[in-house]
């Protein structure tokens, strides 16, 4: 079975006229995801630019605004996108410079991540049986084989959806942003000494830190990996208030 899908996509190439929307009609399998629609549009019109890679929500490359909401089209079903609608609307992420059509420049996102002292791995959680699996093909500082826990990558796939959804980012591109502040919170949890933790708290307490957040929680809704950057921002605020109270009374 197949679906005939009306779709309207944002078109813009800097230096080549004003932004516009262009309508297409494509045919995809009824179990298709929206990325299949985007690829079908490209097959009709190879001047149409978009970005994709893994097709299964691991890389975060294909993020767009779908019917007004930040989504990964590689995992969003076409049937869901068409519910209550006559056509699918696909636009680039907000709060980033547009390179071409759906492609945006997310360099600022990575700069904020780097500035946050991002930790990209953590110890893997226990398996369903409660066992922490280890590997023995690593060497300790004295050159002996040692067992160490497996690491896994952080949940954040650096898709940029949270920055696009964030209303504060729309008002100030200097704001650290949800992903950057969540990364500070994770780095703080992993920090080996109190001085490093204090430095990270001060970073979050800065002019463009947690207090610029308007608590809209749009970032948490947009995140496809349930990182909950809004929760991390609230945790940083709580710990900052606690730290300031203790400092005021000379107890911390």
Image (cartoon, helix red, strand yellow):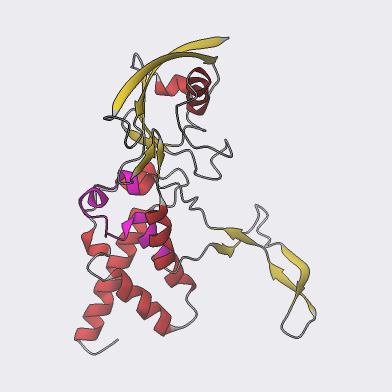
The image quadrant of residue 83 is: top left
Residue occupying the point 46% across, 83% down: 193
Identify which residue, 210 or 17, lies in the foreground: 17
188 lies above or below 218: below
Which range of residues does the magenta coloring cover?
A: 163-183
Report which quarter residue 148 is drawn in: bottom right
| Left or right: 10 in relation to 132 | left
Q: Quadrant of residue 127?
A: bottom right
**Whether residue 74 is situated above or below residue 212 in the rendered picture:** above
| Prevailing secondary structure class for the magenta stretch in the rendered image | helix
State whether residue 155 is above or below residue 17.
Answer: below
Q: Does the segment drawn in magenta span residue 170?
A: yes
Query: Percent x, y for residue 41?
Result: 47, 21
For image coordinates 50% across by 50% down, the residue present is: 157
Quadrant occupied by the N terminus: top right
Q: How many labels, in total?
A: 0
Q: Is residue 240 left or right of residue 127?
A: left
Residue 191 percent coordinates (x, y): 47, 76
Residue 118 among magenta residues:
no
Q: Is residue 67 left or right of residue 196?
A: left
């Amino acid at each position: 079975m197949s679906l005939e899908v009306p779709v309207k996509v944002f078109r813009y190439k800097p230096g080549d006229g004003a932004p516009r929307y262009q309508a297409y009609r494509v045919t995809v399998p009824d179990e298709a995801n929206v990325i299949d629609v985007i690829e079908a549009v490209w097959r009709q019109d190879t001047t149409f630019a978009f970005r994709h890679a893994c097709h299964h929500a691991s890389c975060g490359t294909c993020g767009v605004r779908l019917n007004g909401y930040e989504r990964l089209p590689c995992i969003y079903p076409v049937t869901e996108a068409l519910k209550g609608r006559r056509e699918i609307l696909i636009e680039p992420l907000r709060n980033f410079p547009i390179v071409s059509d759906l492609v945006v420049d997310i360099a600022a996102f990575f700069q904020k991540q780097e500035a946050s002292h991002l930790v990209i791995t953590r110890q893997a959680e226990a398996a369903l049986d409660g066992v922490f699996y280890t590997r023995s093909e690593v060497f300790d500082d004295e050159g002996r084989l040692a067992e160490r826990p497996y690491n896994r990558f952080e949940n954040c796939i650096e898709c940029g959806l949270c920055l696009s959804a964030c209303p504060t980012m729309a008002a100030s591109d200097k704001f650290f942003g949800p992903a950057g502040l969540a990364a500070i919170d994770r780095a703080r949890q992993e920090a080996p000494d109190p001085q490093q933790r204090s430095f990270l708290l001060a970073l979050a307490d800065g002019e463009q830190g947690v207090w610029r957040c308007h608590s809209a929680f749009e970032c948490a809704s947009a995140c496809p990996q349930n990182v909950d950057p809004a929760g991390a921002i609230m945790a940083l605020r709580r710990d900052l208030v606690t730290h300031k109270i203790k400092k005021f009374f000379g107890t911390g």
